[in-house]
Image: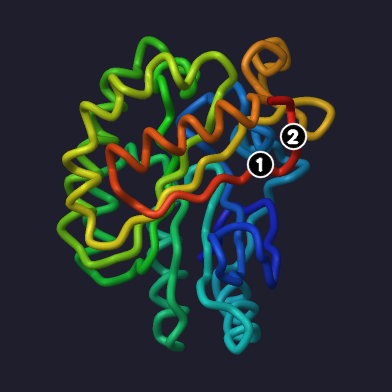
Amino acid sequence: MKAIVAGFKRISLTDVHNEPTFTLWFCGCNLRCPFCHNWKLAIGDRQLCKPIDINYIIDKVVSTKEFITYLHITGGEPLLQYIVLEEIFQGVKDHGISTSLNSNLTFPDRIEQLLSKNLVDHIATDLKIPFDELSGLTEESSILWRKFVESLKVIQGYNITFELRIPVARDLTLKFIEKVLFEVEELLNKMNSIYCIVNPLVGEPLVNPRDRSWARRYCNPSVAELYRVAEIIKERIGCRVYVKKWWSFGS
C-alpha cells in the first residue's frame, strides 16, 4: 500500500509546539486557502507528490523513535487518504510511538474512526476566522464550517491533546473573532487538554502563497494584532496561549 506524499523530515522542532516530531506531508486538500504556502502540495503537483510504500515510511519513523515525541502527519489534508493514514498510524503505534494529526477537521466521521480506534494522541487544527474567507471556498464554506464544528464535538469526547491554531490575517481576524468564538467557545472549553497558538499569516518574500494579491492585502499582521487576538482567546477559552511572532511587522 502506498501513500501520496511530498516528503518527510526525520526530526522537526517546529510542527508541534515544544515537541520533536517525525513530520510527514500528505498530498491533496479539499480547501483552497489563499494564504497557503503548501498549495502545490495541496493540488497534488506531480513534481512534488510521489507514491511511497507505507512500510518504508513506518520503518523510517521507527528508526527515529528515541528522538521524537510524535509521528506528525500534515498536508494538505491527510484525511483525504484515510486508509493509508490509518495504516501508518497503526504501524507506528505498534512500536509504541505516539501520533499527531494536523487536519482542517472537515471530515468528522473519519476523525471519529481514528479516535475510537485509539490511533491519534494529538490533533492540531486552524480556527480560520472568518472561515469562508480563509478557506477560499465561499460557496461551500457553510457546509464545511458545520463539519468543522461537528469534529470539535467529536474530539471533546476523547482524552487527547488538542492544539488550536489561530492564523491571524491583517485587518480581518479581529473583525470576526468575537462572532466565531461565540459559536465554538463552549465546545473548546470542554476539551480535555487544549492549548492555543496564535500565528501571523505571512506572505512574500518569506513564502509563496496561493493567492499573491490576497496575501499582499491580508498577510503580515502587526504584533499588536497578534497580542490582541491572544488576549481575546485567553479570555474566552481560558487555555494556555502562545504567540509566534516569527518576525516583526510593526507595532
Q: Are marks 1 and 2 in contact (CB under 8 Å)?
A: yes
In the picture, measured across the screen, residue 155 lies left or right of residue 249, that is left
For label 1, the residue is 245
Task: State the SS at label 1.
Answer: loop
In the picture, measured across the screen, residue 194 lies left or right of residue 51, that is left
Q: Amino acid at mark 2?
A: Ser
Front-lying residue, 175 or 20 = 175
Image location (x, y in percent) of residue 250: 73, 25
The quadrant holding residue 104 is: top left
For label 2, the residue is 248
Which quadrant would the C terminus be assigned to in this image?
top right
**In the rendered view, would you say 239 is above or below 106?**
below
Residue at image point 23% right, 28% down: 146
The quadrant holding residue 12 is: bottom right
Residue at image point 66% right, 65% down: 13
Marker disc for residue 181: none
Image location (x, y in percent) of residue 43: 61, 32
In the picture, measured across the screen, residue 171 lies left or right of residue 81, that is right
**In the rendered view, would you say 215 is above or below 29?**
above
Image location (x, y in percent) of residue 175: 42, 14
Residue at image point 37% right, 33% down: 232
Q: Amino acid at mark 1?
A: Lys
**In the rendered view, would you say 233 is above or below 15?**
above
The type of colouring in the image is rainbow
Q: CA distance from mark 1 to mark 2?
A: 6 Å
